[in-house]
Amino acid sequence: MPNPEPSTEAALGAVIGPDGLARPAWAATDDLLRDYYDQEWGMPVRDEHGLYERISLEAFQAGLSWATILRKRPAFRTAFHHFDPDIVAGYTDTDVERLLADTGIVRNRAKILAAITNASATIALRDQGGLVEFVWSHQPETTPEPRDFGEIPTVSHESVALSKALRAQGFSFVGPTTMFALMEAIGIIDTHLIDSHRRGSSGVWPRT
């Protein structure tokens, strides 16, 4: 989950926007983050292409703000051939140098190499049912029911298990915290605040 910008105790709960809708503080002020929260965050991603992109962007986000990655996402998509794993898996040293020279993305060699490695690992998983089935098999039986930001965990038994399982399949930059953020973003768990207008909107979990 993106970090909230405000740090006051009051900002940890849902914030009512000018439109009368309740959102977490991190999605309450910035237009880009608000639109992402309203339209995309927490909605199920069940296609290989989309899931590979999310894993890649979560890895690039490590140590940075999600807002930074979101603003750079169009450039990332162009630079990485719209995150087509079949194309990215074939990247050469020339592509790595091209990406390291691209000011529109996060120029981190280790993360770039991880995206290429993970593309190959994604392809290899097709013989085992595919990346989507593999990741979604780690959906827990229950989901958090947070009333404020402080009640939202940053890791779980399932995210630890998913991290370990992906690493065993050759993936990198898929630590437990990063995988928990992925699970939030793609609807495997619902960490929308109880009072948020998006709570239960994914169709995966009922509103509680």
Image (cartoon, rainbow, N blue to C red):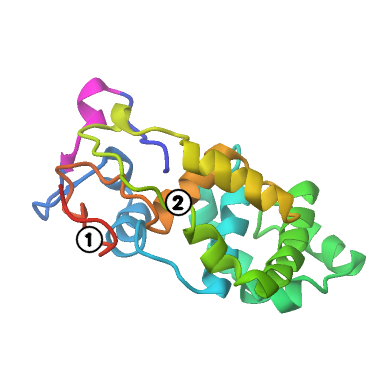
Q: Looking at the picture, tell me which residue is in the foreground, 148 or 189.
A: 189
Residue 12 seen from this side = yes
- Residue found at the very far left of the displayed protein: 20
> In the image, what residue occupies the spot 56% across and 51% down?
58
Horizontal and vertical percent position of residue 142: 31, 45
Look at the image and give the residue range highlighted in magenta.
8-15
Q: Looking at the picture, tell me which residue is in the foreground, 79 or 143.
A: 143
- Residue found at the very far right of the displayed protein: 93
Whether 22 is among the magenta residues is: no
Whether 9 is among the magenta residues is: yes
> In the image, what residue occupies the spot 24% across and 39% down?
145
Q: CA distance from mark 1 to mark 2?
A: 15 Å
Residue 9, quarter of picture:
top left
Q: Is residue 144 above or below residue 121?
A: above
Give, as a three-letter code, the residue at label 2: Met
Number of marks drawn? 2
In this figure, which residue is indicated by the disc labeled 1?
201
Task: Identify the mark nearer the N-term, 1 or 2.
Answer: 2
> In the image, what residue occupies the spot 60% across and 71% down?
130
Placement of the N terminus among the 4 image quadrants: top left
Pointer 2: residues within 10 angstroms few (<14), some, or many (20+)?
Answer: many
Pointer 1: residues within 10 angstroms few (<14), some, or many (20+)?
Answer: some
In this figure, which residue is indicated by the disc labeled 2?
183
Q: What numbered label is drawn on residue 84? A: none
Give, as a three-letter code, the residue at label 1: Ser
Horizontal and vertical percent position of residue 97: 86, 61
Horizontal relation, residue 26 to residue 80: left or right: left
- For mark 1, give the secondary structure: loop
Horizontal relation, residue 13 to residue 62: left or right: left
Q: Looking at the picture, tell me which residue is in the foreground, 159 or 73.
A: 159
Q: Looking at the picture, tell me which residue is in the foreground, 188 or 4.
A: 188
